[in-house]
């Protein structure tokens, strides 16, 4: 909802709107010291969509970070604006997962301005000390907006000590009173920063172990890879290879083939033949491989599929993004037999949807069934899982997928099993008393012990 509000076009109304740069720093408590600063230099853009009838645009940018809003000046009649403006944002302690959101608009003299595209960048993906000079492909958060082009940014992040943090706060307060931007930190001469996946925030924990995570918390652990396909038995590897084979949408367009909407196939398994039930929630992915290249740049149209036996959950397709958000959920029955792969792992595969050819494989994650079976009732495993290729490596594959998983316990069945165990124990005690009265051996006792063990296994 916050992103939607930020991409809502401003309006000039009937009297026009200012075209100069504006700066609105976030309000915060006096003792809320920043942990870092991020200097954002908006250099320029290229290949933008024409928003006006003359084939040009009057582009400007709005930059949102940690409650602060910066709007650049308007550059008139161009599809390749050059701004060369900068501002320094404070990163507060309570926002380790802050997102840098840059939205481009075409200024209009009268009425609402036109949306030209946007960039979303997790601040945690930037190195703690250093700078990055990057061209970023514009994405679209508005359907049918025809977004094209790239924007160039120079980003400099600096972690602050306690003294430096207090000084930065003082500078920000003084500059705010004067109606000016906070002074930027000194230029750093570190090499250009990359975006290591391990730096991005993860979902935090609920269980004492290292794997179980709660969706409300965040931590800085790297994505995990718990199981690779080569470690599976041969039959399970063959089944995984069938899952990995891309769906084919050749000539199908939007009506048939893979399709763009979410889909699921839930094959119920009777209790006697079921190992357990697993709730699978596919939340999002990040830093995926670009499956498409062309005039619109390098991008993908990703979707994910979770396989358990003959059942699957397939998310909707998210168009032109390497950071898709899905949030699709289903409960899948895990059979005791029939599927070699389901005995060992939950299989999640990410694909790039294509209109005119077979979809592209973007990577996979295998979650051991033993890990899921070990979860207590009501406990959730929520975290990032690294995507790997078919051999468990990273050849042509990048990124991670975030899953929330839990084992479902049928309370009625659990109560029935408890009654079965209680009945076995009651009959065993009755048989023991009878055998003691009649002076018989322990054959009956051994038989009931075997029956109790079978009930416990069930």
Image (cartoon, rainbow, N blue to C red):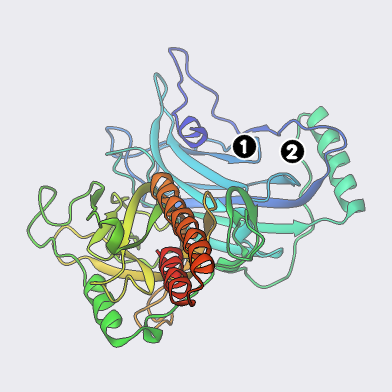
Looking at the rendered structure, the secondary structure element under dot 2 is: loop
Residue 34: give x, y in percent of width and height: 79, 46
Vertical placement of 211 versus 282: above or below?
A: below
Residue 255: give x, y in percent of width and height: 10, 47
Seen as rendered, the residue at the extreme front is 438
| Label ID, residue 70 | 1
Report whether residue 367 is seen: no
Q: Are discs 1 and 2 less than 8 Å apart at CB?
A: yes
Taking the spot 48% from the left edge, 63% from the top edge, the residue there is 434
Asked if residue 210 lies left or right of residue 298, the reply is right
Looking at the rendered structure, the secondary structure element under dot 1 is: strand
Report whether residue 385 is seen: yes
Question: Which of the 4 image quadrants contains residue 187?
Answer: bottom right
Seen as rendered, the residue at the extreme left is 251
Asked if residue 142 lies left or right of residue 32, the reply is left
Vertical placement of 433 versus 52: above or below?
A: below
| Label ID, residue 41 | none
Asked if residue 264 lies left or right of residue 170, the reply is left
| Label ID, residue 181 | 2
Q: Quadrant of the C terminus?
A: bottom left
| Pointer 1 or 2: first along the chain | 1
| Category of crowding for the residue at label 2, using alpha-carbon neighbours closer than 10 angstroms: few (below 14), some (14–19), many (at least 20) | many
Taking the spot 37% from the left edge, 52% from the top edge, the residue there is 149
Vertical placement of 326 versus 245: above or below?
A: above
Residue 38: give x, y in percent of width and height: 69, 52
Is 406 in front, or is 115? 406
Residue 300: give x, y in percent of width and height: 32, 60
Taking the spot 44% from the left edge, 28% from the top edge, the residue there is 9
Is 163 in front, or is 384? 384
Taking the spot 29% from the left edge, 61% from the top edge, the residue there is 272
């Amino acid at each position: 909802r916050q992103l939607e509000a930020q991409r809502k076009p401003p309006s000039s109304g009937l009297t026009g709107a200012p075209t100069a740069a504006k700066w609105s720093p976030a309000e915060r408590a006096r003792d809320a010291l920043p942990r870092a600063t991020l200097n954002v230099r908006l250099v320029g853009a290229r290949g933008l969509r024409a928003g006006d009838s003359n084939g040009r645009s009057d582009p400007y940018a709005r930059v949102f970070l940690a409650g602060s809003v910066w709007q650049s000046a308007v550059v008139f009649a161009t599809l390749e604006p050059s701004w060369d403006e900068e501002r320094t944002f404070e990163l507060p302690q309570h926002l380790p997962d802050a997102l840098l959101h840059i939205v481009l608009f075409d200024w209009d003299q009268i009425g609402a301005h036109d949306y030209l595209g946007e960039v979303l960048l997790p601040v945690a993906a930037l190195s703690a000390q250093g700078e990055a000079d990057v061209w970023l492909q514009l994405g679209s958060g508005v359907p049918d907006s025809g977004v094209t082009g790239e924007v160039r940014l120079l980003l400099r992040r600096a972690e602050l000590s306690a003294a430096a943090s207090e000084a930065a706060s003082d500078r920000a307060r003084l500059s705010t009173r004067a109606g000016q931007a906070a002074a930027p930190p000194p230029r750093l001469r570190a090499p250009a920063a990359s975006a290591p996946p391990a730096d991005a925030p993860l979902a935090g924990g609920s269980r004492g172990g290292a794997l179980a995570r709660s969706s409300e918390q965040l931590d800085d652990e790297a994505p995990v890879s718990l199981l690779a396909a080569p470690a599976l038995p041969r039959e399970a590897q063959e089944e995984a290879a069938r899952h990995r084979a891309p769906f084919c949408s050749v000539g199908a367009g939007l009506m048939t083939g893979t399709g763009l909407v979410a889909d699921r196939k839930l094959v119920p398994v009777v209790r006697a033949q079921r190992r357990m039930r697993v709730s699978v929630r596919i939340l999002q992915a990040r830093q995926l491989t670009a499956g498409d290249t062309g005039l619109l740049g390098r991008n993908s149209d990703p979707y994910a599929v979770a396989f358990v036996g003959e059942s699957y959950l397939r998310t909707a397709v998210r168009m032109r993004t390497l950071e898709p958000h899905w949030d699709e959920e289903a409960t899948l029955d895990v059979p005791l037999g029939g599927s070699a792969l389901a005995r060992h792992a939950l299989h999640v595969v990410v694909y790039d949807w294509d209109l005119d050819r077979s979809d592209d494989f973007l990577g996979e994650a295998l979650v051991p069934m033993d890990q899921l079976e070990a979860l207590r009732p009501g406990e959730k495993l929520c975290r990032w899982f690294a995507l790997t290729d078919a051999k468990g490596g990273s050849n042509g594959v990048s990124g991670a997928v975030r899953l929330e998983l839990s084992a479902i316990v049928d309370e009625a069945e659990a109560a029935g099993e408890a009654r079965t165990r209680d009945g076995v124990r009651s009959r065993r005690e009755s048989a023991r008393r009878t055998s003691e009265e009649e002076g018989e051996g322990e054959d009956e006792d051994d038989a009931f012990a075997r029956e109790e063990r079978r009930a416990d296994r069930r």
